[in-house]
Image: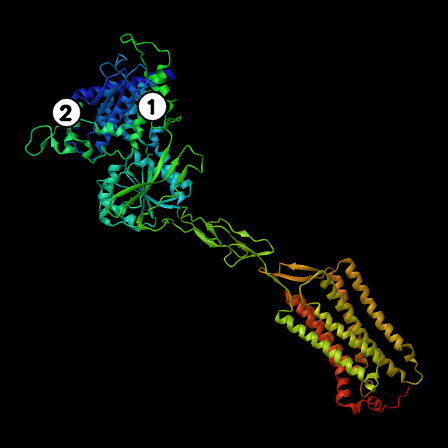
Amino acid sequence: MGNRTVVGGVTMGLIAILFFTLILRVNSNNHTCRMIGQSGFMEFSKEGDLILAGIFSISSTRKLKDNGYQALELKFARIVMFAVEEINRDPQILPGVTLGYRLYNGCGSENLIRAAVEAVNSDEFKDCTGQIQALLGHSSSGVSKDINLILSSLSIPQVSYLSTCACLSNKKLFPTFFRTVPSDSFQIKALVQLMKHFDWRWVGIIYTVGSYSEEGTAQFVQAAKKEGICVEYHLPYSKTSRVKLRRVVKMLRVSTSKVVLLFVSLSYTKSFLSDVKKYNITGKQWIGSESWITQPDLASETTKHILQGAIGFALPRAPIPGLAEFLFSLKPLDFPDSTILKKIWERFFDCSFTPSNVTTMCTGREDLHTVSSDYTDVMYFRPENNVYMAVYVAAHALHSVLQCNNSSNPTTGKPCVTKTQVLEHFKYVNFTTPNGIKVFFDESGDSATRYDMVNWQIQEDGSVEIVTIGQYDNLFPDGEKFKLKDDVKFVWGGNSPEVPRSLCKEPCPPGTRKAINKRKPLCCFDCFECPEGTISNQSDSLECLICPPEFWPSKKKDKCLPKPTEYLSYKDIMGALLTAFGCVGIFLSLLVSIIFLTHKETPIVKANNSELSFLLLFSLKLCFLCSLTFIGRPSDWSCMLRHTAFGITFVLCISCVLGKTIVVLMAFRATLPGSNVMKWFGPVQQKLSVLSFTLVQVLICILWLTTNPPFPKMNIMYYKDRIILECALGSAAGFWAVLGYVGVLALLCFILAFLARNLPDTFNEAKLITFSMLIFCSVWIAFIPAYVSSPGKFTVAVEIFAILASSFGMLTCIFAPKCYIIIFRPEQNTKKMLLGKIPTRTL
């Protein structure tokens, strides 16, 4: 099957050659582009043992126009001559063998293919002496594709120096094609990296119909999408269609992208600039393709505002020693059979080789140094190096073939090289040119990729300076392929003083998240603020992060900050007020104690056990003091102290009140005939009862502290944005047992005092105790729902308020009337006034 395919391919190739040969012979006298007097397509030749062919477009129409492009093609042809002569002088390459060339000129794709057919269809085709070993060219990707369809069936290697279409890397379609110019796929990668580096994520593209532009644009769109770069538009431009031009101009005016990639050939660039300059398109950063970015003649008074700051990738420049002198040594007299060279010479010097009254006669010895043309531009060699390398590629491949033991030509006795052998050795060439360029091919026939990144800088005098500002080298590892120079000044398009921004949507700032809008391109996303309790700390975050429990987002929601802690502090207004009330309570208790102490021998103090009164006043001082333990930052000791101190001091206080209540009841019971109750509840029994009631609370507190004591706790659940520092109860049962025991004693005291309220006495203390216990119970009954429902530090404030209110209630109700009598009604502070008249009681 494989042999049939090869035979079929060769057969088709021979049929194609015969077909084009027939066309060549039938139309040999009337094809439109051939110069008058030209007998074939071959323009320059040099005989040798081994022959290289070259295809060039030095002329384009019957009437020659030196528009620069054709002069450049002449320059390429001359570089082939220069390289061949240099190789023939080098004893290290092809020793003992001379290298020759046949350089063909054609215009239009049809004539260029005819020229290729002529190159392989020489009269000596049957003898290996005259056959070509390789073909150099063409500049155009489309022409190179057509030529290779013929050459591949004959296994003739083709080396192009300017055909950049990525399609030519397909070895199944173009098996004999090689090139010394980088493929457009590498240029596309470099352009994408350029836009990624400057963060240009929103771009427009203008292209033309044809292999180079269309396929390059399609590749760019795909590669850009992978890097997150969106294409706002990609519009075709045509030299002849005004509708397409108007569409392009309208889009340039209304589009939001600031960066425009002009991926067209040189001739189309000239036409595009000529058309667009009339519409005053400004504010754009133009990116150029390799085909035109180094052509300073594009700039004019009307187009320089467009090209100012343009950026693109160009073929790397390198000197070629001796080439400039060789180019300037060209003389028509050296090629008397070349009509086209005479025509170009006439254009260069505005003279004529035929007598004329209008122009001067050409001598053929004019000095090319006085001519400004692409041919005479020897300042920088960029594409010229590719032509130079192409000749050396063919020479090194032939040199490798001749190292083998081949049969000799029976006529000349010199080695006969077959095209198949040459093709195989093309794949493995690896050498360095005399000017220091490393050359080799990959499996697709592409050479090493190197680009100079250039920037158009138009000076005030109108001169154009194309400055190299960086490099792209595909041989370097990822991340290092694209490099900018550090000491170079950039000029940006649109007269922008800084790097232009070209984004469909500005990056989502920290504190927001990026959401894809399905109705828009990927770069035209939406930004949403992070929900409460979440942050994003970088731009274009796809999701918001939840802050740890102890943290809360900042106002901008771009970082998590420690939550502020909250507790009842002495510095708070509420804490300061409660502290003040507590101190007032201590002061009043102390004042009452002093009053009672100074009047301890008076009847009103001695009545109803003065010792219990002093003990009650002491316990009230402790109650006011224990309220202060609830203020301040909770700690292990303060949490255990505040609840236990509260429980014990209040039990001590209520026990004293309960003792006084019992004394009142017992005192009036003792006045009954035959009653000896007081001997069972004397001063000793009263102290023991107070001690017993208090010890019970002490035991409850000890049990609570040893099993599951209160501890400081950070409450992060009640508020989202702050932490409540509070004392956890530890054992809720312990807390409610302490509080419940206080409540039981208070209720018992209230009941006994209520029963004794109507006993006959001018100064019945039971009434005062009743009122104090009524206030106490009311406060603590109201405390329970308020304590449970109050948030944060207000829980502590409620508890302190309950302590102070109940303490003030007892202090005021029990001791205020007595102090009033002692200070303001001393005449009532007598035993007679206290007892009054006691009616006779009957049993």
Q: x, y percentage for residue 65?
A: 17, 33
Whether residue 747 is visible to the viewer of this picture, yes or no, is: no
Query: What amino acid is found at the position of numbered circle 2 in the picture?
Result: Asn
Q: How crowded is mark 1: few (under 14 residues within 10 Å), some or many (20 or more)?
A: many
Q: Which of marks 2 and 1 is in front?
A: 1
Q: What is the secondary structure assignment of the residue under circle 2?
A: loop
Q: In the figure, residue 445 lies in which quadrant?
A: top left
Comes first in the chain, label 2 or label 1? 2
| Residue visible at 86% across and 74% down in the picture | 687
Along the viewing direction, whichever of 350 and 436 lies nearer the viewer: 436
Q: In this view, does 368 lie above or below 115?
A: below
Outermost residue on the left side: it is 357
Along the viewing direction, whichever of 246 and 803 lies nearer the viewer: 803
Q: What is the secondary structure assignment of the residue under circle 1?
A: helix
Res 477 label: none
Q: Which residue matches tag 2?
A: 30
Query: What amino acid is found at the position of numbered circle 1 in the picture?
Result: Val
| Residue visible at 75% across and 62% down in the picture | 733
Q: Which residue matches tag 1?
A: 393
Q: In this view, does 362 lie above or below 785?
A: above
Q: How crowded is mark 2: few (under 14 residues within 10 Å), some or many (20 or more)?
A: few
Separation (CA) of disc 2 from disc 1: 37 Å
